[in-house]
Image: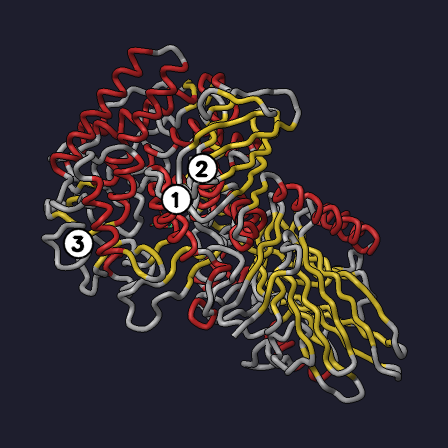
Amino acid sequence: MEYGHFSEDGYEYIISEPLTPRPWINYLTNNDYCAVISSTAGGYSFYKDSRTERLLAWHGKNLFSGRPGRYVYIRDTETEEVWSPTWEPVRKKLNQFECRVGIGYQVIESKFKNIATEITYFVPRKESCELIIVKIKNESNKEKKLNIFGYVEWLIGNADNYNFHNIAILWNRVNFDKSLGSIIARKTASYEEYNIKNNPYVAFFSSSEKISGWDCNKEKFLGIRNTEASPKGVFEGKCGQTICDGEEAIGVLQHNLTLKAKEEKEFVLILGQTKGKSDASKIIKKYKNLKNTKKELEAVKSIWRERVDKIQVETPDPEFDKMMNIWIKYQLYICNMWSRSPSFYHEGQGGRGYRDSCQDAEGIMSLDINHAKEKMRRISKIIRCDGTCAPGWSDTYGSYSNRPFKDHPTWFVSTVSAYVKETGDIEFLNEKTNFIKDKWRNRGTKADVNWNQGAVCDIDATIFDAILAQLNCSFSDVSVHGIPRVGEADWNDALDMAGRRQIGESVWIGIALVRSLKLAAELAALLGKHDVGQDLLSKAETMKKAVNDSGWDGAWYLAGYNDDLVPFGSNKNKEGKIFLNSQSWAILADVVTPERLPIILKSVDKYLDGKHGLALLEPAYTVFDPGLGRIAMFSQGTKENAAVFCHAHTFMLAAYCKLGMGNRNYEQMCKIMPNKQKDMNLYKAEPYTYAEYLIGPDHPYAYGEGAFTWLTGTAGWTFMVATEWVLGARREFEGLCVDPCIPSKWKSCRIVRPFRGATYDILIENPNKVEHGVKEVFVDDIKIEGNLIKPHHDGKTHQVRVVMG
Ligand code: GLC
């Protein structure tokens, strides 16, 4: 069954059926405020951090429930019929329904009998609020009297306090403020890890239309033990003007509209959070004026359009183009803005993870250098003086504590190296930052005490110092095979018990470290630090040798050893015999020897490939293994337990491209592309944004189902694979390299890409049907030596013709 389609220009996805197999969602956001919204208006909103400053309640911790949300109820006073123009939560059958998922906005249009409604949702560019424009038309030939209710369910404050310690409800104080014409919701203090602080924030819910009634008390409005599907207040056609103190709180605004035959009316609901009431009042005043609201909507559309229109590709595959030209960039921005926490499907811890942020920044580098640079600066500030780092940070409560994710020190250099290649700005390496004074505090055994005490504290540092500290730390943080310790995670967060005693090792970290050491050596060379560079290269060689000596399993690379030195990702294991990441990264890091390369490629094909893509590992764990951790708790085929984990799948795509395997890459790329999924009742997830994973082949019944969409490193990596590797317009220190790796059936393709102050319009011709290899390159009709274009820095567009062969 089809649930929708892309608009002709591709910038909207039009959902035509309210009951999609899963809630299909959108993120409406500026840098401070975010509204997560489904196609039936479910979801929640937050300010700066999805856990600590949550405005709206969210009970959607599963894949199929889409409630509650920001709702509108309509009641026809004559017939007493009640419906929701967004279908949820009343679920009354509508005569027409359409949700247009836009880039930065969402429109839900519907018709019930003769009443047509169009509701537009968006978040303005700057203010911390969301705006809901409700347009309602009486298409009948007689006058209609309607009660219209705007409805939200407050959480206000820290979601943990609310979800785990229900006592936080007793902190609610919600009332209607006459002077503001707004419901005001607040908790007087905020409570984070036993630290109680005065809470300066107020949440508000207001309207541009005359307010005929209001309610703040959930139980009183819904009726005893009732749900939002059939609120008593709506069915009775009147609010009770209830305040709420220490109970579950809502915000309801009632409007009584009389619409003449064919008459249309429009008003705006304003929901947000500010420090104090006076800022709230400014926002309400501004957007009560519909002209301002509409002007702002156009401005929002145009900034998003500008963002996603940068870098364009044109290939024989329109689905590929739509994804890479529009939707993946939108997803990449959302990942960069909010990292992984504000999911619709599971509640995150808030904040931003270190490794995710490094990869997001690298992924967005060619699109938004300023965003990437600011993020790198922020990341550099959570590196400790001993080269470890805090696992992440939040914009509301600073950096997190000290869980040992031992892969973290390997990521930053890759991002910084990409930045220098994109911009040529070597000076950034000398930019001052500062280390966190604190060192990593061991949670565990004596084994690490020396290492933990070894570091010297040098608070002033440069970006390059931070990179060096990290890599030296990782290089010396090894265990019995000379391979880095795994601690409580490598890339794989679910290996959380593999190295608790600080003995277990990750072969994958060893491999990633080789790549990182080599990238750092290149940076050292740029700075003229040749001794440092030599040292880094010799460390890379040492680690490469350790991996090839102790990390090889006969036909593939191991994933690691646990604290009992039992290998995992080994043929010796009954389950989890082979892990994808050790193979893909052995290629990306040039760790694999020429003899072993065909062997690992064959093993990946034989054990991990399937019709829905490459599984993360095989076979899935069916028995819990306390020596590995939660990886073996997940049902087989889900999440890290042998799903087709799209982010990891994309590492392998990059590896295929590195090897010049254009056909293989494209074939695998298509398997996980959301808009290429044919059976939507199987795939279930949004066709316009990548899923974190597709359920893997070992699952008893759901192989191929997409899950946990939007917030995934897949966006950044896929975008890099598509633009830097497939279309091959790749940043290098010396300039822009053109090195396409395409399916051999593509006769030609094109990419237009800005690079160091000029634009390159690159036409790729493939007369000999090859998948890789460049015969000649012409820049503005002049043939150049090789395939590296020296930067022009002239603000002009240069025509490049690449002939493959
Ligand atoms: C999630 C996390 C990412 C991690 C991956 C595998 O996608 O955001 O950091 O690498 O899971 O555990």
The residue indicated by pointer 3 is 577
Of residue 214 and residue 408, the one placed in the foreground of this image is 408
User: Which of label 2 and label 3 is nearer to you?
Assistant: 2
Q: Residues within 10 Å of mark 3 (few under 14, many from 20)?
A: many
Q: Which mark is residue 662?
A: 1
- Residue 369, position in %: x, y? 55, 31
Tell me the mark number nearer the camera, choosing from 3 and 1. Answer: 1
- Residue, disc 2: 740
Q: Tell me where residue 583 sits by quadrant.
A: top left
C-alpha distance separating marks 3 and 1: 28 Å
* 421 relative position to 458: left or right: right
Q: Residue at x 18, y 64 (%)?
A: 623
Q: Amino acid at mark 2?
A: Pro
Q: List x then y, in percent, for residue 18.
A: 59, 73
In the picture provided, is 668 more to the left or to the right than 53? left
Residue occupying the point 33% across, 32% down: 409
Tally of numbered discs:
3
Judged from the image, the secondary structure of the residue bearing numbered disc 2 is: loop
Q: Is mark 1 within 8 Å of ligand 1?
A: no
Q: Quadrant of the C terminus?
A: top left
Q: Is residue 233 visible?
A: no
Give residue 268's position: percent from left, percent from top.
77, 61
